[in-house]
Image: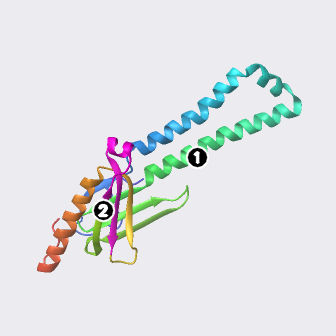
Amino acid sequence: MLSPDHIPNKRNNEKIVLFLRRHWFAVLSLVVSFILLTVIPIGLAIYFWDTLSLWLAEPFFGVLLSVLISMYFLGVWLVTATGFTDYYLDTWIVTNERIINIEQQGLFQRVASELDLTTVQDVTAEISGVLETLFQFGDVEIQTAGEREHFEFRHVPHPEHVKEVIMQLVQADKRALATGQTPPA
């Protein structure tokens, strides 16, 4: 588990400035979907209980229906667990020297990449839509001169603030390199 106290491949004098995960609204939509996908079928089963109990009493069809119902609820649980894992393990770390992007892709694949602040060319914050405006979350895109063209922080809280912090760090890093000093800690 990645915590704000841990930096992968930590460098000397490197300090965390921002430790980001997606906004809580992303997990709220996952929870609402889970509730709807479980409550509606249960409600329908209760409403049509007389018919459903007759079907379940059938020797072949009852077993088949029980298996299908179990598969449905296990599928809903699996999709929800995978979505939460993706939400929780996607992290972005901004330090005084670099930006680290750690993305969970499915249950068993994780991709970590990083870029030095000196390669950052442009940072864009985007808030689009009513919900993003109300709850103050959005995307931050970082354009680089490096091998990987851009980093994207999806659905992070306060994207304008994140953009400003990154731009201040980039400018401080470039000023320090121009004067031959080490970047500020």
Say which residue appears at 38% left-offset and 47% top-offset: 129
Can residue 81 be seen here? The reply is: yes
Is residue 26 or residue 70 the one in the foreground?
26
Q: Residues within 10 Å of mark 2 (few under 14, many from 20)?
A: some
Q: Where residue 68 appears, x then y in whole percent?
A: 75, 39
Q: Is residue 29 left or right of residue 16?
A: right
What residue is shown with label 2? 124
Can residue 13 be seen here? The reply is: no
Is residue 81 or residue 47 the one in the foreground?
47
- Residue 74: which quarter of the image? top right
Say which residue appears at 38% left-offset and 66% top-offset: 151
Q: Where residue 90 appears, x then y in whole percent?
A: 43, 55
Q: CA distance from mark 1 to mark 2?
A: 31 Å
**Front tag of 1 and 2:** 2
- In this rendering, the answer to whether 105 lies above or below 83 is below
Mark identifier at residue 26: none
What residue is shown with label 1? 79
Residue stretch in magenta = 124-144
- In this rendering, the answer to whether 155 lies above or below 15 is above
| Amino acid of disc 2 | Thr
Kindly state the secondary structure of the residue where label 2 is placed. strand
- In this rendering, the answer to whether 136 lies above or below 113 is above
Q: Earlier in the sequence, mark 1 or mark 2?
A: 1
- Residue 176: which quarter of the image? bottom left
